Image (tube, helix red, strand yellow):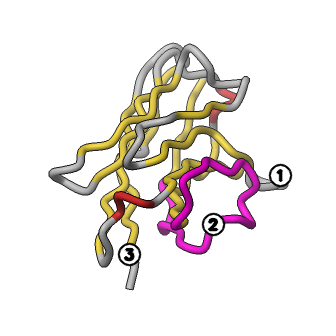
């Protein structure tokens, strides 16, 4: 059974940084695509960034390009989202997702496994 545990959220001032972690277990994730999504109150869940585990191929939403970086640590089975230059509009619950595909889909319905979410709040 795939398990994803998100962590690292918190309260930060605009311009600050946070690093989110997604610890994955229950499978060999070398053939998986891993994604980060976020959902603000009253809004739909949206794609933030993704990585194909074995190739390292990445994809980012335009709104976070140049500010966020996704990476993975094979030894720890963990995916990270480094978030710099945070803005108040980045405030949301952030979710890690996984799917056995070699492509980063931006549609959340394509992912079958989800973490519990971690709250990120950016104050102005």
The quadrant in which the C terminus is found is top right
| Element type at mark 3 | strand
Indicate the position of residue 37 as horizontal and vertical percent values: 62, 50
Q: Residue at x 51, y 25 (%)?
A: 68
Q: Residue at x 59, y 52 (%)?
A: 93
Indicate the position of residue 53 as horizontal and vertical percent values: 40, 49
Magenta segment includes 107: yes
Q: What are the residue bounds of the magenta stretch?
A: 100-118
State whether the magenta stretch is mostly helix, strand or loop.
loop
The disc placed on residue 43 is: 1
The disc placed on residue 82 is: none
| Element type at mark 2 | loop
Q: Nearer the viewer, mark 1 or mark 3?
A: 3
Residue beneath disc 2? 111
| Element type at mark 1 | loop
Of mark 3 and mark 2, the one earlier in the sequence is 3
């Amino acid at each position: 059974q795939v398990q994803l545990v998100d962590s690292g959220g918190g309260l930060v001032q605009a311009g600050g940084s946070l690093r989110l972690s997604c610890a994955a277990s229950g499978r060999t994730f070398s053939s998986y695509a891993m994604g980060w999504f976020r959902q603000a109150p009253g809004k739909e869940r949206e794609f933030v960034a993704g990585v194909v585990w074995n190739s390292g191929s990445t994809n980012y939403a335009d709104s976070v390009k140049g500010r966020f970086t996704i990476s993975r640590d094979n030894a720890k089975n963990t995916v990270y989202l480094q978030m710099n230059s945070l803005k108040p509009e980045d405030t949301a619950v952030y979710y890690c997702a996984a799917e056995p595909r070699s492509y980063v889909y931006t549609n959340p319905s394509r992912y079958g496994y989800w973490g519990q979410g971690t709250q990120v709040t950016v104050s102005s």
